[in-house]
Image (spheres, rainbow, N blue to C red):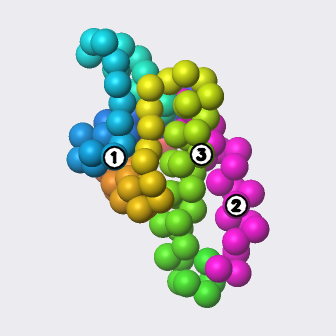
Amino acid sequence: MKNFVVKTIANAGALAVAVWLLDKITLTGDSTAKKAWTLLLVALVFGVVNWLVKPIVKVLTFPLFILTLGLITLVVNALMLLLTSWLCDKLNLSFHVEGFWTAVWGGLIISIVSWALNMVLPDED
């Protein structure tokens, strides 16, 4: 349970950095508290998408992983971010990613920042 909370906080922080750096990734809200709450909910959606969908996509695209020496990971991460944006729209969360290339850059930023935050934040291990 503690690991889940740490990963969710790391995802929320990484998403916040992506929103801050990229104009076409938007998070709207009336107040800072509302934005923070929305960011945590988006991080939960993102975590569920990565937990449920990403392994299936990785298995289906395994030959492309070998062929591109893993660079297809950028595309898979972008697709997971776009799926998160779509789900957030359906759940009335004010998070939106506009366009594939924005999602590629956002996925790259989120991967780097969440990796760094997971290194710093406490873990069960």
Tell me which numbered mark, 2 or 1, is placed earlier along the sequence. 1
Query: What x and y, as percent, mark residue 49?
Result: 63, 42
Determine which residue is flagged by label 2: 57
Left or right, 58 with respect to 104, comes to: right
User: Residues under labels 3 and 2: Cα distance?
Assistant: 12 Å
Q: Is 123 colored magenta in this rendering?
A: no
Q: Residue furthest bottom?
A: 67
Q: Main secondary structure of the magenta part?
A: helix
Which residue shows up at 69% across the image and 56% down it?
55
User: Residues under labels 3 and 1: Cα distance?
Assistant: 15 Å
**Quarter of image, res 17:** top left
Q: Kindly report which numbered mark, 3 or 1, lies closer to the viewer in this rendering.
A: 1
Q: Which mark is residue 41?
A: none
Which residue shows up at 61% across the image and 87% down it?
67
| Mark 3–mark 1 CB contact (< 8 Å) | no
User: Residues under labels 2 and 1: Cα distance?
Assistant: 25 Å
Determine which residue is flagged by label 3: 83
**Given the image, on which type of amino acid does mark 3 rest?**
Leu
Above/below status of 8 relative to 72: above
| Mark 3–mark 2 CB contact (< 8 Å) | no
Visible residue check, residue 45: yes
**Quarter of image, res 25:** top left
Above/below status of 29 relative to 25: above
Which residue shows up at 34% across the image and 18% down it?
29
Read off the magenta span. 44-64
**Given the image, on which type of amino acid does mark 1 rest?**
Lys
Q: Kindly report which numbered mark, 3 or 2, lies closer to the viewer in this rendering.
A: 3
**Given the image, on which type of amino acid does mark 2 rest?**
Val
Visible residue check, residue 18: no
Q: Is 47 colored magenta in this rendering?
A: yes
> In what element is the residue under mark 2?
helix
